[in-house]
Amino acid sequence: MNMNNVNAIFQKDLKDFMANMSLLVLPILPIVIAWLYNQTVETAGEVSMPIEMIYTIIAMAFAAVMFMSIATMFAEENEKHTLRGLLQSPASIIDIIVGKVIVSLFITLVSLAIALFIVDGYEILKPIDYLGMFLFMIIITFMGVAVGLAAKSVGTVSAYSLPVMFGLVFSPMINNFVEEGHVLRTIVDYLPVNAMVNLHNEITWQPILVLFGWIVAMGILAVIVISRAKKDD
């Protein structure tokens, strides 16, 4: 990995991000959701934000901001046929991926920091929660790269994003509507965001193993898609 190439990709994609209105809207979503949740909790007279709501905000930041921005940036390169030029430049595929991921991660962390401040999330989260978020970040990175390289247009990314948004962002809220022991609740416990909630509630190896399982699965998918992209170009 060449840091000069990574920095060049970072500078280019940061400028592109700031000039793209569809991408600029994404960091606002977790902040708006956090504000709405905060108003709901204050109206209900609750002392603190339920952990499920906190993790819905966290999932929104990583899924709506990080996943969508990574996938969209790669899809735009495919759509404009500029990815071939990047791959034929001195920058390696790793340089390109790292440069784009740093841009999306920077924007995501700023958005998430503001959202958590609004809901006093820093007072609720434990040190172990940050480990869960780090593992989730890796999952989202692999997922975004795989979808972005596989998609031939930005419209395709939008279609792929729907199951990601519903499957990840709103999965913690399902537990509020499904009885303990229900098969649906068992299934969603193996989704990454629910694994993070379970890790917050009780520090055990099971949710950590679930997160590592997702990392392995998404990592394999990303490697396969990257290999195909290199062969195609």
Image (cartoon, grey):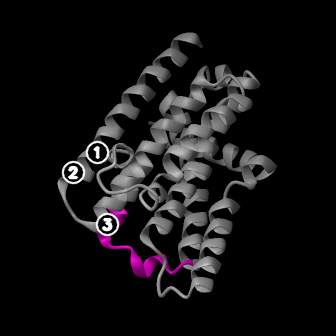
**Front in this rendered view, residue 19 or 159:** 159
Q: Residues within 10 Å of mark 3 (few under 14, many from 20)?
A: many
Residue 25 seen in this snapshot? yes
- Label 1 vs label 3: CA separation? 14 Å
Closer to the chain start, of discs 2 and 3, is: 3
Residue drawn at (49%, 77%), measured in percent from left and top?
49
- Describe residue 53's horizontal placement relative to residue 30 as left or right: left
Q: Circle 3 is placed at which residue position?
A: 200
Q: Principal SS element in the magenta part?
A: helix
Q: Quadrant of the C terminus?
A: top right
Query: What amino acid is labelled 1 in the image?
Result: Val
**Front in this rendered view, residue 73 or 59:** 59
Q: Quadrant of residue 221?
A: top left
Q: Circle 2 is placed at which residue position?
A: 206
Q: Are marks 1 and 3 in contact (CB under 8 Å)?
A: no
- Describe residue 212's horizontal placement relative to residue 87 as left or right: left
Magenta region: 119-131
Label annotation for residue 210:
1
Q: Residues within 10 Å of mark 2 (few under 14, many from 20)?
A: some
Magenta-span inclusion, residue 38: no
Residue drawn at (59%, 85%), measured in percent from left and top?
42
Q: Are marks 1 and 2 in contact (CB under 8 Å)?
A: yes
Q: Are marks 2 and 3 in contact (CB under 8 Å)?
A: no
Query: What amino acid is labelled 2 in the image?
Result: Gln
- Describe residue 120's horizontal placement relative to residue 223 as left or right: right
Indicate the secondary structure of the residue bearing disc 2.
helix
Residue 81, percent from left and from top: 73, 21
Q: Is residue 212 above or below residue 148?
A: below
Residue 103 seen in this snapshot? no
Magenta-span inclusion, residue 121: yes
Q: Is residue 221 above or below residue 59?
A: above
